[in-house]
Structures are given as structure tokens and as C-alpha cells.
Amino acid sequence: MPVIAPALQRNIPWLLVVLAWTIAPHVAHLPVWATPLCIGLGVWRWVVARRGTKLPDKKLLLALAGLAGFGVLSNYGTTLGRDAGVALLIVMLCMKLMELRSVRDGVVMIFLCYFLVITNFFYSQSILMGLYMLVAVLAVTATLIGLNQPTQAGAGRRNIRLAAILLGQGLPVMLVLFVLFPRVQGPLWGKPDPQLSAVTGLSDSMSPGSISRLGLSGAVAFRAEFAGVAPASPLRYWRGPVFWHYDGRTWTVGAARHPAPISLNVQGEPVVYTITLEPHNQRWLFALDFPLELPPGSSMTEDFQVLAAAAARQRLRYQITSRPRYLAGMELSQEQRRDGLQLPPGYNPRARELAASWQSRAKSDREVVDMALNLFANRPFAYTLSPPPLFGAHTVDDFLFDTRRGFCEHYAGSFVFLMRAAGIPARVVTGYQGGEYNPMGNYLIVRQADAHAWAEVWLPEQGWVRIDPTASIAPQRVEQEAGLLAALPASEPLPMLARVDFDWLRKIRFGWDMVNYNWYLWVLNYGPKRQAALLARLGVKLDSTRDMAYALLIGVGGLMLVFSGGMLWRLRAQPKDATVAAYQRFCARLAGVGLTRGAQEGPADYAGRVSRSRPDLAASVARITDLYIALRYRIQSGQPPDPGEIGRLRQWVWRFRP
């Protein structure tokens, strides 16, 4: 049976812990069979190390590796790509545990663990993941140090301390490389997930209950920074998908809306702002009405919706200019009139009858609009996140005349139905309304809970006019900064943090969001523009790649010179004899409690004086002093010192805490 190297045998538990710590974040992405396999292999290797039993035969390992590779291929249909590649790396790395025999095998596994640490950033680039992986790198480095130690003396805390020192020494070099290395466009870490299966946000359709479900989500939709003062809450309508077609239950976009000339009359001062949009896997770019100056590569449809060239599968940051007060679309095309009046035949007869009575009595379309708003304001309608389900064929009738409890999609959808039934072109607009101001970062946080639906009607000489029927039921939803929280009673199931009124907890929440936001701006989104802005702020002007290379060479070279000089100074200042160095640390610790060794005082006399002053230290002092004297005697007599005894002296001094 091949002999396992003692240094490797001692560090098997460390290696298993490090591997488990690094793999843990991947468990959610692995096939269901992979995690039990990895746990089983780890337990098997620990038992082998503990009992000294034989490692499995290579034929068995080859069979297991073949089955694991086939399992990955069956799950993903390939062994290439992000998910399949990471899964294959993890299972094969765990297989490697079963053939560790030499220190070289352990070092190879350590380097693979370093690579595995990097793969975690393919799934999450948050600060918490960065801190988690920093601990992983520290543990991996400490294990690497342990593999290269000749003895076990001082293992554990000493290895972690040395690993922390090494990482601390590398930190300045890392910062210089990060700041000065030429940047490329695109995300910091690899290719985003094209599926984005876990994304939360608005949909490309709207039916009863679809938006109220978002009211329970505290996830951030986007953040907005304003060049000046932010508009008041009643003007903060962030436009998203616009729905024209209704099938009796669900509102959809209908026919594709293409960019087209728009008749526009704007008023007031422009509002300039920058949006940092979270990934939502759609082309929608949210903007305040009415968007004028669009981001590069984007376009605006004939119903005023801003679209990007491709779906937002990673965070996007764009600047846009809007005019909150405007008249737009004064000329209505035949196609828009047809789509704005579309209703499925046979649905909601009571609502149709009500709208027809309004149309017969009203002198203008605006009067019909006011009649509908008065209906919502004067009848016992309720604004709630938990409306009763509408399962019947006539959902608008059931809501208007029976349940009368709904969220914004109920009011917007039924209002547009009534307008169309009265002969007024109308459409449903979805997006977000309001937002929470973060005073620590001076920006607005718009969450999924701020998702909203409103209506637009076309009126002669006014064009498309925004009408928010929710404001007739719950005006606090639109008019107050608290938004949804102010509009709903305390019994509603809002997110926990939305109900918290403690100022200190709110400050913690704002502070953490600001940290995350700046992490994205200055780390994940640190591209060429951000790099140029930072260097300009530091007073550094680098006009070319050559200048950047020179600055990088000077920065890294200067740091290396400083580190080299510091290490040379320490080597000269410290004695070369490891025994003397350990004893000097021992004396320094005693001096820290007032027991300083005299200039002409010998080790034995010093130990006797310390023991008389501190009887509680007598045993430890005597043990360390006797071993030191014995080692010094052997060295002075020309005998080679025993490395094990030197290691024991270091360990005793390290544990000595007077």
C-alpha cells in the first residue's frame, strides 16, 4: 500500500473543510445527485485518513468518474458551458480526494480550489459573496502553508495568521492593478445567464392579481440619481409595458409597436437623471414621462415606451432626460383608434351598459372620464393586496359590481374597459410609481413593490392623457412618499422591512443599500469611463494605453521595492537563529507584563526571578527556559539542533500568554 505523506495526512481535515466551504454556494446550482456524491466522497476520505485504511482502487475511481461525467452530460446535455463546467469541476475535484498520497497531490488540489473560488462569481457578484470567498481564499492559503510545513508545531492559528499576512501584503498590489489595468467594456465577471429564471418583475401581460403579487417583493427594480431635485411623488410615473389588447381576462401588448414620429408639446424644466436597472430579461428601459433624450442604442415606440436594443440580462446604467409636463400624441392614427377601442364581444354586459349610459348623458369625453372616477371614489371600493379571485367569464363586471376589492391592475383594467365601451380610445400602462429616497446616497430606490398600473385616454386637443383610477380609491398611493405603505392598512401582508418604523433600522437598510450600490458602481461597473473619471479625480492624466502601462509598471514596481526593503530590514533586525528568535519573543511577552529581562541576566536567573514574581507562570517559564538552554548548549557544542525540538519551543512560546 503506498505511503501517504505525513504533511498531507495532517492536513486532510483542513483540506476537506476548505473544499466544503468553497463548494457550499454551488449546491443550489448542482444536479441533485452531485451534492450527496461529494459529501460521501468527503466522509470516505476522512475515514481513510482517520483509520489509516487503504484508498480505493484506481479502477473503481475510473468507474465513478465515468458515471459522474455521464451524469453531468445527462443533466445539461453537454460538458461545456458555465453550469456543466462548474458541476464537472466540482465532482472531479471531490474524486481527486480519493487519490491524494503525496504533498504534490495536495498542492494540485489546493490550486484547483483557488480556481473553484473564482467560479462562484459566475453566479453572484455581491459584497457578501466577495467576503465569503475572501474567507475561502484565506483558508485555502492556510492549508497550502500547512502542506509545506515540516512539522505540526504551531499549526492552525499560525498558518491562518501567516496566510492573512500574505493576503494583506498582496492587497496593495491588487488595488494598483485594479485601478490602473486597462479596462474593457462589459460586466466584470463573464457571461450572464441567458435564461434568468429567477428574475422578478413586470410581465408582458396583465391579469387580475399579476401586479399585486409584486407588492410583496422588496427586491430592487432600479435606482435613479437626479442631476437636480427629484420630481414630486405624483409625477414619478416610471413607464414600462403598454397594453392595447384585451381578451376578456388578460391585457397584452397586441400588435408590435414600432418607432414613429410623435406630436409633442412639452412644458416646464427638463429632468435629467441616471438609472441603474437591475436585470429583468426584457427590453424595457423605464423612464419618467415624457422621455426626450434617449440612451444610445435605444428607441421609443409610438406609445412612448423606451426599448433597448437587447434584453437586459445584466445591470444597465443609462442617462435619460424627461419632461414631466407635456401634451403628446394629439394626432390619433386609424390603427391606434382601432386598437384603443378593441373589446372582445360578449364580455361584461353590465359594464358595457353603464358605459353606454355615461356616453348618452355626457357632453364630452372628459365628462365620461370624470363619471368613471366618481364611481370609484363614491362607491365602497377597497384598495388591497389580497383581492378575492375572479374566476368568472365577466371579470370586470364581477369586480365593479360584486367584489369591489382590488389592486391597481383591477382599477386600471376596468377603467380602460369602461372608456372603450363608451367610445373613448384608452390603453393600460404598467411600470412603477414613486420610489424611496435614500438620503445616504442621494438617490431614489424603486422596488418591485412599487409596481403600478394606470390608464391613458385619448382626448381631443390634449392627446394621450394619464388617468390613474387608483388615486380615486387610495390617493396616498400616489401623493405620499410612503407610497404603497401609506395606502394600505396595517393588516395587509407587506414585506417586513416596509412595516418597520424604527429610524435606526431604516438607516441600516439605507446604509447597506448604499454600500451595495457603490460596490456595483466602483467595482462591478468599473469600466473605461469610470476608470477615466477616477484617474481624473486623482489628478492623473493617462492619454494612451502606453501611459497606462507605464503607470502600472511604476505602481507595481514601487510596491515591490517597498516590500523588498521592508523584508530586508526585518531580516537584518531579527536574529538568524530560530531558537534565539523564539526566546526573544518569549522575553518580549514577559516584558509586556512588567517582567523585563536585565541586560546581564542569564536565562536561568531570569526564569527564577519571573517564577518568584509570578508563581502561576512558573511551570511554563521553566519548561520554555530549560528547552532553550538545552538547544543553545547543543548549538554551541557543534551538535545539529533537532528541528522537532525547535518547533516545540516555537509552539510553547506561541501558546504562552502571561
Image (cartoon, rainbow, N blue to C red):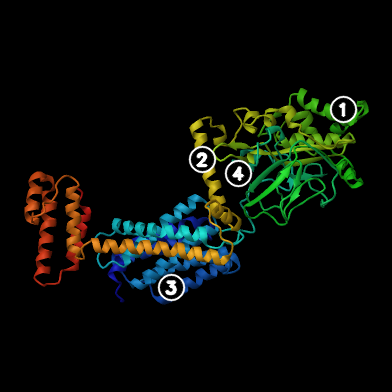
Residue 305, position as x, y percentages in the image: 76, 47
Q: Residues within 10 Å of mark 2 (few under 14, many from 20)?
A: some
The numbered disc on residue 507 is none
Image-based side of 459 in relation to 123, left or right: right
Dot 2 amino acid type: Gly
What's the CA distance linking mark 4 and mark 1?
A: 39 Å
Q: Are marks 4 and 1 in contact (CB under 8 Å)?
A: no
Task: Give the residue pinned by disc 3.
Answer: 61
Residue 585, position as x, y percentages in the image: 20, 55
Task: Give the residue pinned by disc 2.
Answer: 511
What's the CA distance linking mark 3 and mark 4?
A: 47 Å
Dot 1 amino acid type: Glu
Task: Give the residue pinned by disc 1.
Answer: 367
Dot 2 falls on a residue whose secondary structure is helix
What's the CA distance linking mark 2 and mark 4?
A: 15 Å
User: If the image is split into quadrants, where does the N terminus sit?
Assistant: bottom left
Q: Say which residue appears at 52% left-offset and 55% top-offset.
A: 28
Mark 2 or 1 closer to N-term? 1
Image-based side of 129 in relation to 414, left or right: left
Residue 56, position as x, y percentages in the image: 38, 72
Q: Say which residue appears at 71% left-offset and 51% top-offset.
A: 295
Q: Residues within 10 Å of mark 4 (few under 14, many from 20)?
A: some
Task: Give the residue pinned by disc 4.
Answer: 220
